[in-house]
Amino acid sequence: MLTAPMKDLIATFPLGFVASVTSAGAPAVSPKGTFIVLDDRTVAYGDIRSPGTRRNLMANPAVEVNFVDPFKRKAVRVSGTTTVHMKASDRFVQLHPQWLDVFGALAQRMTALIEIDITAASEIWTPPYDDGATEDDMIAIYKDKFGAIYP
């Protein structure tokens, strides 16, 4: 389901924008910066302080997540269903060392791991690619733009 370029983007930019559904049926989007690719069909993030998102996902496990490379202007969209693994659970204990390896001390603050079984994944790219822009072109443009914002 996830291709090598998709996995690379998520590993490089582990900030995913998680869309869940509230109890009132409204969409709720919240950024989560602790994503790890577990395998071709599974991603997960460490929950540090997102009780609203966790509550939404426990009531309705449907989720969509977008990951964005702001320089190449490419993205990965994954849809799937979640399982919430609280800190004391066997699955949390089994998976958590991967977050320690990647995120170090931040992983100690995680109170749950949210595992997403991917049912669909796709790549998204900005329209200039349709007109012949290359990744190098996009990187140069956005390095300049971000450099002007953060000199």
Image (tube, helix red, strand yellow):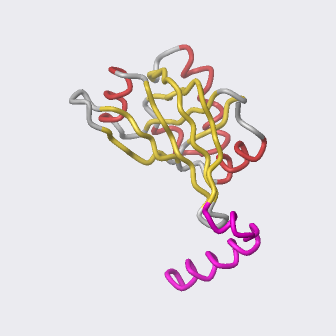
Q: Which residues are magenta?
A: 126-151
* Residue 132: image location, x then y, percent: 75, 69
Q: Is residue 64 magenta?
A: no
* Residue 5: image location, x then y, percent: 75, 47
Which residue is painted at 37% across and 44% down in the image? 29
| Residue 92, above or below 49 | above
Q: Farthest top residue? A: 90
- Quarter of image, res 122: top right
* Residue 25: image location, x then y, percent: 26, 30
* Residue 130: image location, x then y, percent: 69, 63
- Quarter of image, res 102: top right
**Quarter in which the C terminus is drawn:** bottom right
The residue lying toward the viewer, choosing from 8 and 73, is 73
**Quarter in which the N terminus is drawn:** top right
Horizontal relation, residue 23 to residue 62: left or right = left
The residue lying toward the viewer, choosing from 86 and 147, is 147
| Residue 134, above or below 106 | below
